[in-house]
Amino acid sequence: MKPHVLGLVAASLVAAGAAVADPPPDARAIVDKVVDGDPFGMMDSQLVGRAVLHDSKNDERVLEFHMDRLRYKTGLSKTLTRFSKPADMAGVGFLQTMRDDGDDDRYLYLPDLKKSRRIAGALRNNSFVGTDFSFADLDLRDLRESNAKLLGTDKIGKFSYYKLEVVPTRADSQYSKFELWVRTDNFLVFKWDMYDKSNTLLKTYQAAEMKRVDGHWYDSRGRIENHRDKHSTDLYLDEMHAQAPADSEFTVGNLEKL
Amino acid sequence: MISERFVRWIVRHRRAVLAAIVVASAIAAYSARRIEIRFAFRDFFDYPANPELKTIDRYHDYFEDPAGFVAIVVESSDVFDHATLDYVATLTRALEPSKLFSHVRSLVNAKATRWTGDSVDVGLLLATQAPTAAEAERARQVAHDSVLVHRVLVADDSRSTIIAAQLATAPTSCSLEDLRVVVAVVRAAVTAHPPPAGIHVRITGAPVLEVEASDALLFDQKVFTPIAIALIVLALVLAFRCVHGIVLPVIAISVAALWTAGLFPLFGRPVDMIASTIPATLLVYGAVDPIFVLRRYLDKLRAGLSKEDAIVASYRELTLPCFLASFTTAIGFAAFGTLDLPMIVAFGRVMAIGVLLAFATTLLVLPALLAVLPVPSLAAGSTRLAERIDRFMVAWWHWLQRRRAAVLVAAVALFVAGALFATRQTVSLFYTRILPPGQTDADIRFVENNFTGVIRSALFLEGPADSMKDPKVLAAIARVEAVARGFRVVTVAISLADVVAEMNRAFMEGDPKENRVPASANLSSQYMQMLDPGDRARLVTEDFARSHVMIFTRDYGTAAWRPMRDAVMAAVHRELAPLGISAHMTEENPAGFDVLDPLVGQMVWGFALAFVLVVVFIAIILRSIRCALITVIPNLVPVVTCFLFTAAAGITLRVGTVLFLSVSIGGLFNTAIQFLARVQQRRAADPTATPDAIVEESMREVGPPALFTAVILSAGFVIFTLSRFPDLRVFGVLAMNTLLIGFLSDMTYTTTLTRMFYRWRR
């Protein structure tokens, strides 16, 4: 009888263990967590980075920028981006404040005009300063206002990823759906397939390197590729400070200060 | 004589010869299965010897090939209404997933710069497909102000819009079958999504044109070849009134045509617009020698010779003039071999070979068949028509004898008029207007009148890295572009400078005065960074070293296009060269125009060269410089007359229209050669005969078959007036005129000049 008793005890322990293990989070919760922390891990950080643009002939152009990002409310952030290179882009600034009660605020500062211009909402689907990211990719509204479905968990290399299908619900979204691979341990986006309204794969973002700095995870290197235009942008974060900037920094007045 | 021995050998081994001909014909028919019929615009510029090709290839390395899109034109009372926008969105989305297309551009995904107060938007023209009336009105204004949208995607009156489906594979790499698939996919999308009431759809664009033009070529072949054969049969019925006279020449020329078709695939080219004339031309040219031989054969039978002796005697007298006529015709076609354009070169070579094969079949097939078949009725050929022609020849010669001086003065007057009218001749090539009229042509004209049109030239600009951000360069580009816009032939011109100016206006709160390139280099650069990468890549390379001005023009011919090109290039020299920017006018149309315009001149010179060679060859074969020179004026008369006709009718000189020169050269000299050879034979046979009698008798012997030949050749070319291709119709009329006038000229001038200048005394 002893072996049977031991077997029953072991089985009970396994069952009990299984009962107390975390159930997989639901898709909405994963997406909210991605948005709250920023898909690339940029929330509450001060960053210095580069965007290297490649056209179909592999001619390249490098933009260097400084970006401050602050979470001012759950899932909402303020971002101030200022370009330092190339010389003709030096001083160009962009301020974005996400809103949950209306359209986001966006201001662009062009030093030669000596004043900032409000950028209209229809711009969302346009390129962000010539990169393959659109403003919509950065304002995350298509993730924020969406229906999400967890397709499963994939193991790629050493890490596990949630595979999600996210369907934006906004009428003005340029996308019909996203497929996201989100790392289960840090909720950073490893791969992000973006489909246009015709369900054709339009763009793919893929992280090439994730780094942990002061306990904060970042997509420190990645590439976004526009399959239709044969254009791509490599994104590098060269300096990462996991330190939330002051809220007072995110004003139009400050944007216009050089 | 060699020909006599050869013909006797053929007659002796007639069954073996006929068997060999059947085997050769079967092989040729098998080979001919590989012939492809295709019309392709690239045939006019895409060949290694074209010096423009490197530039156009380099240009296409950086900027997309605009020829490769199917345009769906959607028409309605207002394309900004909900129903039309919904339909445009539906079609756009139906086509976007297809791997055949790299982009599908339309109103629903177009981007444009606009402003509202101090707010700027460079995003989608239509943020939603269901705009309010005010939003639709604003979108209309923005579309009309945007160089990338106005007349590119939306017509002036907002009653039509284009959905442009850009091919994923460059059109130059597409087979005709690929293009058929592309067009079928678009048609299927329209069928699956039929336009609602009040909306009308047209499908056009270069792929559609190529497919439909290829089908028109195929249709032409199905029409031309049977009609050519029917005309030949009709002429043979009139000439001979016997089965021999109809069946034997038809078999001989059909064998020649089949052998030529068997060789055609070896040239590695499809049957294009020019090559489509080969079968009918060859059939009618091939009929010439058999007509002369049969006529002479019947004469010999009537003179009491046996069948074999009649065959041999006919060939003894006719082999040399037939060879000479065929050889000179072949020279006329072979002259095309000196040109660069492969479609013309291949046409010339195939026709030259075909004409020589026709001579070969006259020498092989005809005597073998004559030897196998029973002797025809001797009444054949001596019809009432032949008697009337004979009486006409006699009367004509007697009339001419009294008016030699007047006849020569008329020729001189004709040449003087030709020289005067020559100054009014214009070389002007068309691009789309060479295509068959009909719905396709109407669609192109619609696109030309309401949108950019389909003729694009590109001013390809190259400079150091970042040079295209320089405001001085951008301002210079704008000035050069303004020069282009000053020409009526230009529908739309688009450049990077326009887009920068539009952005500047938007960032300056819509001030119309600010629709200009700003003085600040940084600001220009920053504006460009605001553009979508896809849109920016259409205008400038990522390193800002290369850009272009897209100049769309109406198809008014190269005579209207050239002054614009010259003025733009002069402006480039003045405005951009000092800034270190080099510029080439390129794209498919300039690359074609710049080689096709000179090609027309080369074809005229090629004709002149062939003409001289034929005259020299006649001098050698007939052993008489005098005889050779006698042929010059009679054969120039029809050519000058035709040029007078083209100048008077306002027909410009272009590849399709000057083709008649070389095509008719053999037909022109044919009668003169036969006539002079007959005069020499008569003179040798009876040295005591008077010159008047020799000329008259030669005229009566050569005249009737020459007339039948001229009628057959002319009728053969008349069938091209049934073609759906305008240039082929003009070609048919000109070739027909040349050959008919050539016959009259021979009967008038060759006879008169022979009587006056032939060396009668020895």
Image (spheres, coloured by chain):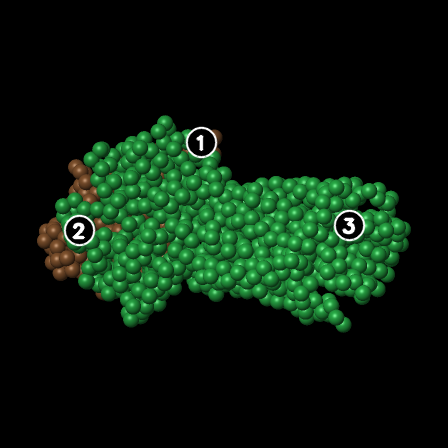
Chain colours: A brown, B green
> Mark 1 packing: few (<14 Cα in 10 Å), some, or many (20+)?
few
Residue B192, numbered circle: 1
Mark sitting on residue B512? 2
Q: Which of B726 and B189 is in front in this view?
A: B726
Q: Is residue B198 above or below residue B499?
A: above
Name the mark nearer the viewer: 3 or 1: 3
- Residue B447 pos. (x, y %): 38, 43
> Which-is-in-front pick, marks 1 and 2?
2
Which label belongs to residue B375?
A: none
Amino acid found under the numbered disc labelled 3: Arg
| Residue at image location 36% in from the left, 41% down from the top | B162
- Measured as percent of width and height from the top left, residue A118 is found at 16, 48
**Which of B657/A107 is in front?**
B657
Label 2 packing within 10 angstroms: few (<14), some (14-19), many (20+): few
Label whose residue precedes the other's in the sequence (1 or 2): 1
Residue to which mark 3 is pinned: B295
Given the image, on which type of amino acid does mark 1 rest? Ala
Q: Distance between the residues labelled 3 and 1?
A: 64 Å
Which part of the image, by quadrant, shows the C terminus of chain A?
A: bottom left
Chain containing the residue with disc 2: B
Q: Is residue A90 left or right of residue B370?
A: left
Pointers 3 and 1 in contact (C-beta within 8 Å): no
> As shown in the figure, which amino acid type bears the numbered disc 2?
Pro
